[in-house]
Image (cartoon, grey):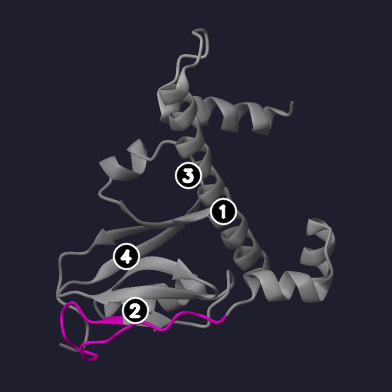
Amino acid sequence: MSDLADAVGRAVLAAAQVDDSAPLGVDEHLRLIAASARAEREVREILQRSVAAARGGGASWALIGAELGMTRQAAQQRFGGPTEAGAALGPDAVGAERWLGPVTAFDEMTELDAAGRAGWRTVEVGMLSHRMVRTDTQWEPRRIFWRASLAAEERNGWQVACRAFPWIYLVRDRGIPPEGT
């Protein structure tokens, strides 16, 4: 068993609250099934985000397909769906939503910074895009590599905006009105 499989197995056991040293009854088996299904959904989402990050970083569909053991066309069909469209309340309304994109790993931080100064805060990452919500203050964005503990960042006022493996997007309220208001 690989280290990754072992880690996933331990996480599933913990999520199911199953003691692996005791005999399993029907209830424990059902909790394991439910936790395994949740883990599968999470892993699929991580794979989707990994492919999106690779595409944003310049990887071709041919390279991605080869890594996954499928053709370029199969990889593109499975992972290259259209970007979601967000609903809007109006471009300047607090609570309005919009999608920022297309952006790549190379230009997204510049775009997020400009949007943050205008009062937009990222709340979700899609394929080469960010779903933004309009607020009445400026936001500072930050992108960090995925890690378990964010205690140091939280002590410095950062909060998780969204997770998109292999990245975590953080935001910090600047406490000043948006530019241009």
Amino acid type at mark 2:
Ala
Residue at the spot of label 4:
140
Q: Quadrant of the C terminus?
A: bottom left
* Callouts 3 and 4 close, C-beta under 8 Å: no
Above-or-below relation of 181 to 161: below
Pointer 1 or 2: first along the chain: 1
Q: Give the residue at mark 3.
A: 38
Identity, as a three-letter code, of the amino acid under mark 4: Glu
Of badges 3 and 1, nearer the viewer stands: 3
Q: Earlier in the sequence, mark 3 or mark 1?
A: 3
In the displayed structure, would residue 142 be above or below residue 91?
Answer: above
Q: CA distance from mark 3 to mark 1?
A: 12 Å
Residue at screen point 53% across, 38% down: 36
- Magenta span has 94? yes
Residue displayed at 52% across by 51% down = 41
**Of label 4 and label 1, which has the lower sequence position?**
1
Alpha-carbon span between mark 4 and mark 1: 25 Å
Residue position for label 2 = 115
Mark 2 nearby-residue class (10 Å; few <14, some 14–19, many ≥20)? many
Quadrant that contains the N terminus: top right
Question: The magenta stretch spans which residues?
Answer: 82-97
Kind of residue at disc 1: Ile
Q: Are marks 4 and 1 in contact (CB under 8 Å)?
A: no
Rounded to the nearest whole Å, what is the CA distance between mark 1 and mark 2? 26 Å
- Amino acid type at circle 3 is Arg
| CA separation in Å, label 3 and label 2 | 34 Å
Q: CA distance from mark 2 to mark 4?
A: 9 Å
Dot 4: element: strand
- Which residue lies under the disc numbered 1? 46
Depth check, front residue: 129 or 34: 34
